[in-house]
Image (cartoon, rainbow, N blue to C red):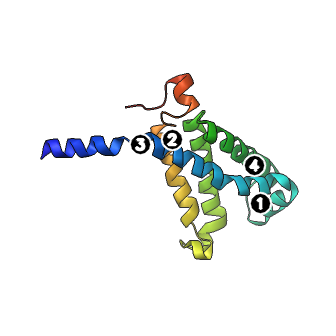
Amino acid sequence: MHNVLGEVAVLFSYPKHLIILGIRLTLAYGFSMPALMKINDIKVTSTWFESIAIPLPTVAAYLVSALEIMGIVLLVLGLFTRQIAIFLSFIMLGAMFFVHAQYGYSVENNGIEIPLYYLLFLIILASFGAGKYSLDNLIFKDGNNE
């Protein structure tokens, strides 16, 4: 039985790096529209942040927008993946708390469901790194290649 479980574990480890690449690209795509909307009209973003009681709304608008744009690029490249995943996780926690929590869980009601999924994917990247198909692996040998 132990050998069978070992073989199953090896079988499921083969697509690991493709799955991590898929997570990185999916998150980058998911952040793209919200980030572009924020950065294209930063004044509206700042006003919106102020209306939902985010402290220092102008500073927060620039910081969140910059981190999201940087996050898109870094996730696609697989560069500094663990670090940007941590920063983007804080943004997701803020989105859950300031924007979505009042609507409950369901995505149908604009609840925390989607930001929670993003947060879970970001935690995976922060934990396991960018995978074999990344600049992190090429430059820093942080692809977690086992």
The outermost residue toward the bottom is 109
How far from the left and from the top, in percent, is residue 7?
22, 42
* First along the sequence among labels 2 and 4: 4
* First along the sequence among labels 1 and 2: 1
Residue located beneath label 4 in the image: 65
Residue located beneath label 1 in the image: 49
Q: Amino acid at mark 2?
A: Ala
Q: Secondary structure at mark 2?
A: helix
Q: Mark 1 or mark 2, which is nearer to you?
A: 2
Q: Residue 55: name its quadrant.
A: bottom right
Residue located beneath label 2 in the image: 126
142 vs 76: above or below: above
Taking depth in this image into account, of 33 and 110 the one nearest to the observer is 33
Q: Secondary structure at mark 1?
A: helix
Q: Mark 4 or mark 3, which is nearer to you?
A: 3
Residue at the (58%, 52%) spot, across then down:
26
